[in-house]
Image (cartoon, rainbow, N blue to C red):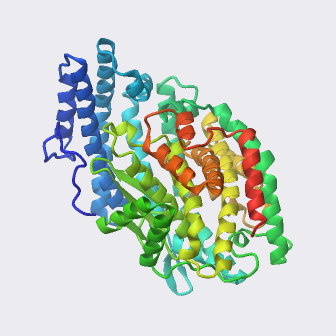
């Protein structure tokens, strides 16, 4: 990354701040706590000063996280991030609560513009209500356990066909037509994961107990209820999520069953095994959209230019600034993410590209998050420079579908381009189902926090099969099946952050449908929604993007019909 420059000149903080020094960070929080406010103008400036402090501190933590995930085997980077989690965050949590209370108190004296600050104040009010100082050290323990999970997963490699490979690299073999090769690769990867199953299960059990205690400390019925409040889910309820599960089971699983049945027939198999679901069903060689990361970057830059020229320019600036780390390598944490450096107001993209078709879609997705961060970076309030997760994922998933219209950048052959699109739409069906699986599983775990690991394995199997898991033959692979959920980092690191993908996917599909009728209008609405950040409610954000905030049968049924029709074209 280039030397980071603040988006705006600091007004409250000096240019040099030791963000890794506890006393220094506490001092700036205390200055705000002790500040005497005599007018509405001073209160609004105080809010901006706080936002400046939070932005700079958040950026310091983000940089440490990025450095740690890019190189989990570097002890100094892991130690630096660990120090931030253990010493800085716990030290300021109580001070942040004091700042929240001060704002609410001063708001009673000076009338803030309700239209401007309603969402901001609503979130702070909730944070004050659920804050409990006893939970600060508990959350620190969870954060450290999350880092341990990252380190264990990042260290997983497989010796396969004479070469040491990362698990993302092993994923390439699942696209190979040679079924024996696929099976060997799948089994090697699954066995490697199972080597650490006890460690990961123990990590999760510790997290579960800590999270349950956090909920009890706030007098919440369970951690699910607590988490809904801490995630500021004001516009829907746990019951809405469970209705989503039921609707997916009724309307989406049958479509998935049709897809798998067709795959089985095309592959001339009696049963589908876990290593048969990613490969091309007609036996064609795996799609190879690019040979190296440079070609991935250039291809996506051209796609964004075609979607909307300003997006292409923004991505080019990210390239030039060094805000991408895309190639898979040993010691790198798994997965992919976009992180915003909140003082510079610039996005950073991390992923593990290995040259498969999915890498293209992943970069389109993470770039959607980056464009969202850039679209709302003008807002002076940090809280409004990121949207609620349900809409953040609309930004990313919509960019997959919009960018997917220009896959010729990677596939000169029309057949390959169509094949990639078909596989992506099938993946969307799977994701809607997988979201229901993970969300239902998490609800059960946290509504039954005293469950034993054996009960958890049994319930995982029941929930997995409820949503079509039994359409795949797992005979002889019971142990691998029991711990499939270990691969889902959200369960470990960001519990209950998953239903957002289902809600957002339905929103993204609506934007895609709009683009089929009016491309420019759909792009205009999309960018309009992104520009609002988190400054309004979820229903209003969706409305501004030209879509409906709804994940009931009313929306799911017509969207599924549209996807089904699209799949018939391929």
Q: Position of residue 187 (x, y in %)?
A: 65, 73
- Can you see residue 154? yes
- Pick the quarter of the image with the N terminus: bottom left
Q: Residue at x 21, y 41 (%)?
A: 22
Outermost residue, top side:
109
Closer-to-camera residue (466/175): 175
Please identify the quarter of the rendering in which residue 130 is found. Answer: top left
Q: Residue at x 27, y 42 (%)?
A: 88
Outermost residue, bottom side:
162
Q: Position of residue 514 (x, y in %)?
A: 63, 51
Q: Is residue 355 above or below residue 371?
A: below
Classify residue 449 as left or right of residue 18: right
- Pick the quarter of the image with the C terminus: bottom right
- Can you see residue 323? no
Classify residue 382 as left or right of residue 189: left
Q: Is residue 93 above or below residue 143?
A: above
Q: How many numbered tags mark residues here?
A: 0
Q: Position of residue 172 (x, y in %)?
A: 58, 76
Classify residue 139 as left or right of residue 453: left
Q: Is residue 92 above or below residue 403?
A: above
Q: Position of residue 102 (x, y in %)?
A: 29, 21
Closer-to-camera residue (189/413): 413
Closer-to-camera residue (80/353): 353
Classify residue 494 as left or right of residue 236: left
């Amino acid at each position: 990354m280039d030397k980071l420059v603040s988006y705006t000149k600091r007004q409250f903080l000096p240019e040099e701040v030791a963000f890794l020094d506890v006393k220094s960070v506490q001092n700036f929080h205390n200055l705000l706590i002790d500040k005497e406010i005599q007018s509405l103008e001073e209160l609004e400036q105080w809010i901006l000063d706080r936002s400046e402090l939070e932005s700079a501190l958040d950026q310091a933590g983000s940089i440490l996280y990025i450095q740690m995930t890019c190189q989990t085997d570097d002890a100094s980077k892991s130690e630096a991030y660990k120090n931030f989690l253990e010493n800085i965050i716990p030290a300021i949590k109580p001070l942040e609560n004091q700042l929240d209370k001060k704002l609410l108190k001063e708001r009673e004296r000076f009338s803030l513009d309700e239209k401007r600050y309603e969402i901001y104040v609503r979130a702070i009010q909730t944070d004050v209500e659920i804050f409990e100082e006893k939970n600060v050290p508990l959350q620190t323990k969870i954060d450290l356990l999350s880092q341990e999970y990252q380190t264990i997963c990042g260290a997983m490699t497989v010796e396969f066909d004479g070469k040491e490979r990362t698990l993302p690299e092993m994923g390439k073999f699942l696209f190979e037509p040679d079924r024996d090769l696929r099976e060997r690769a799948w089994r090697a990867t699954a066995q490697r994961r199972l080597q650490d199953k006890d460690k990961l299960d123990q990590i999760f059990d510790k997290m579960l107990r800590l999270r349950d205690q956090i909920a009890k400390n706030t007098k919440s019925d369970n951690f699910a209820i607590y988490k809904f409040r801490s995630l500021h889910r004001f516009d829907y309820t746990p019951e809405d999520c469970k209705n989503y599960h039921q609707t997916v089971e009724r309307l989406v699983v049958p479509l998935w069953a049709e897809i798998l049945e067709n795959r089985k027939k095309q592959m001339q198999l009696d049963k589908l095994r876990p290593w048969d679901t990613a490969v091309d069903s007609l036996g064609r060689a795996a799609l190879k959209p690019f040979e190296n990361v440079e070609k991935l970057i250039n291809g996506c830059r051209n796609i964004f230019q075609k979607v909307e020229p300003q997006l292409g320019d923004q991505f080019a600036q990210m390239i030039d600034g060094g805000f991408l780390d895309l190639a898979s390598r040993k010691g790198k944490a798994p997965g992919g993410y976009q992180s915003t450096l909140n003082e510079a107001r610039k996005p950073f993209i991390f992923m593990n590209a290995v040259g498969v078709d999915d890498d293209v879609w992943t970069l389109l997705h993470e770039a959607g998050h980056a464009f969202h961060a850039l679209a709302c970076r003008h807002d002076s309030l940090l809280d409004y420079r990121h949207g609620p997760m349900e809409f953040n994922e609309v930004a990313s998933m919509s960019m997959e579908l919009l960018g997917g219209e220009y896959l010729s950048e990677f596939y000169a052959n029309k057949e390959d381009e169509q094949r990639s699109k078909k596989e992506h739409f099938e993946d969307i069906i799977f994701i809607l189902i997988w979201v229901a699986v993970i969300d239902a599983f998490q609800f059960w775990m946290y509504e039954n926090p005293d469950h034993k690991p054996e009960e958890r394995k049994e319930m995982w199997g029941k929930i997995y099969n409820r949503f079509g898991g039994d359409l795949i033959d797992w005979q002889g692979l019971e142990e691998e099946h029991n711990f499939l959920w270990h691969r889902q980092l959200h369960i470990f690191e960001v519990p209950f952050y998953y239903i957002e993908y289902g809600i957002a996917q339905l929103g993204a599909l609506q934007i895609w449908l709009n683009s089929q009728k009016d491309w420019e209008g759909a792009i205009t609405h999309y960018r309009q929604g992104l520009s609002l950040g988190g400054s309004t409610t979820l229903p209003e954000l969706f409305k501004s993007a030209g879509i409906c905030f709804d994940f009931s049968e009313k929306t799911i049924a017509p969207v599924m019909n549209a996807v089904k029709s699209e799949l018939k074209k391929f």
